[in-house]
Amino acid sequence: MNHSDGAQSPPLFGMYPLPYWATNSQFLLMMNFQNPLMSPIHNLGSPILTSNLNFPQPPINFDIKCDQSQIIKETPQPKQPQQYFSQIQTIQQQIEEMNYEDITLDNLEQMIHLIFADSSKVKKIMQKLKEKKCVKVIKILETLNKKIRSQQKSREELIKFCLRKAFREIFHQIQEKNTKSKLNLKAASKLFQQSYQAEKLKQISLPFRKNSKIKTMNNHFLHELFQSKQFQDQYKTFLDNLDTIIENDRNKKIKALAEKSWEFISSNRKAYSVKRLPWSIKNIEKLKETANELLNYCKEQQKQ
């Protein structure tokens, strides 16, 4: 074909001219067809036909893993039970009617509850206390607020708390089953050790006691403990009652803290200090996570 007017001839594929102008992608594919490094593609037939084929891509797990990690990050933290929120809402309503000229022990206990619940009402209460110049009450609430915000519990402390409360709950369960013999906690703990020995054919030393060999937490003890099917069942019952146990523990400690703080208000002392405090909501959320992780961890250990 003669193109004397300056037009270019259609490109050649091998020895034969193409009947049309190839697109860039088709031209690139044709170049690959003649490339010996791309020889596997020859089995697909004409490169012109294969240019419109969609090749299935192998599954890529990386994106899936990233999505899962994102889901984990966006998972909301465990919330406090509805019963506790109802208690705080009731306190917030009652505190609205508080007489700042005549604050009582009950009022002080309610305000301390709001501090540990991280209630938005605390800021408004502090402003009114400053207006009424309730210096000692302000000092108590500011001290507690500062300490509770800096409170951080290590994983070992979380595990210790779980096991202490779990053992105590288990001993109470044993007491309830032996009402006729009227067991005390010490006798109930001995019955627990005897039943463990009968099941696992080995003795177990209860941790964190004065005469106990186990002063600190270790994985070996946890593994041995959760090997007991009986203990696992008892521990599951403990998890079912964990919200109530935490709530009772918090209420008891806040009540004691309010009474000690009231003594400071009633005295001539100027310095206010406290050592042991109830746990903050953040630490309680970590505690719940740890309590459930302990059971899941030991289940995984059994599979190995």
Image (cartoon, helix red, strand yellow):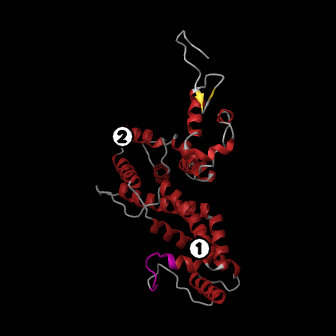
The residue at which mark 2 appears reads as 130
Could you tell me which secondary element the residue under label 1 belongs to?
helix
**What label does residue 301 carry, if any?**
1
Image quarter (top left, top right, bottom left or bottom right) of the C terminus: bottom right
Residue 16 vs 258, above or below: the answer is above
Residue range (magenta): 211-220
Q: Is-magenta flag for residue 214?
A: yes
Inspect the image, locate mark 1, and give the three-letter code of the amino acid beneath it: Gln
Give how far across and how far down residue 60 sits, in percent. Answer: 59, 49
On screen, residue 30 versus residue 177, left or right, reads left
Residue 259 vs 18, above or below: the answer is below
Measure how far apart labels 1 and 2 are at the Cα level.
Answer: 56 Å
Residue nearest the observer in this picture, 251 or 104: 251
Viewer-nearest of discs 1 and 2: 1
Q: Residues within 10 Å of mark 2 (few under 14, many from 20)?
A: few
Inspect the image, locate mark 2, and give the three-letter code of the amino acid beneath it: Lys
Give how far across and how far down residue 14 sits, in percent. Answer: 60, 33
Count of picture labels: 2
Residue nearest the observer in this picture, 1 or 113: 1
Say which label, 1 or 2, has the lower sequence index: 2
Which residue is the extreme one toward the left?
270
Could you tell me which secondary element the residue under label 2 belongs to?
helix
Q: Residue at x 52, y 62 (%)?
A: 287
Residue nearest the observer in this picture, 193 or 40: 40
Residue nearest the observer in this picture, 36 or 73: 36
Q: Residue at x 55, y 86 (%)?
A: 204
Secondary structure character of the magenta stretch overall:
loop
